[in-house]
Image (tube, rainbow, N blue to C red):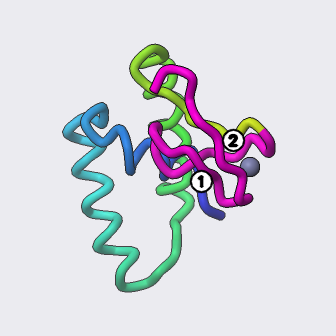
Amino acid sequence: MKNKLYNYLLRNYWVLFTDSEKCYVNKNIRLQATNNVLSSDNIIFQNEVVKRLLEHYPTEIFLNKCPICGELARTPNAKSASCGHVWYNKDT
Ligand SMILES: [Zn+2]
């Protein structure tokens, strides 16, 4: 199962990951390239990273969600979702 929130944070907020988290991610990317399976350890890791980042950086992290379906957009500045809906942020 893909963790969309984790992937969003990984893609957009890599700078907020700790060195040990970055190290774990890099190691697992190499492992996944060979067996293409998310281990249960990795799933636990992803959930913990999501929890930690959202707790520690509630103002830094902007979860850019589609106002129609609630799905996370690709980036904090994106103005469209995979559902096809397009919107414009008031502050940009
Ligand atoms: Zn949508």
- Residue at point 79%, 45% (across, down): 69
Tell me the mark number nearer the camera, choosing from 2 and 1: 2
Dominant secondary-structure state across the stretch colored magenta: loop
Along the line of sight, the residue nearer the viewer: 5 or 12? 12
Looking at the image, which is closer to me, 30 or 83? 83
Query: Which residue is identified by label 2?
Result: 66
Alpha-carbon neighbours of circle 2 within 10 Å: few (<14), some, or many (≥20)?
A: many
The residue indicated by pointer 1 is 3
Amino acid type for the residue under numbered disc 2: Cys
Q: Is residue 66 magenta?
A: no
Residue in the picture at 46% in, 45% down:
75
Q: Nearer the viewer, residue 80 or 7?
A: 80
Q: Residue at x 30, y 31 (%)?
A: 16
Question: For residue 30, which numbered disc appears in the image?
Answer: none
Local secondary structure at mark 1? loop
| Mark 2–mark 1 distance (CA, rounded to whole Å) | 17 Å
The magenta stretch is: 68-92
Residue 82 percent location from the top left of the image: 66, 60
Sequence-wise, the earlier of marks 2 and 1 is 1
Amino acid residing under circle 1? Asn
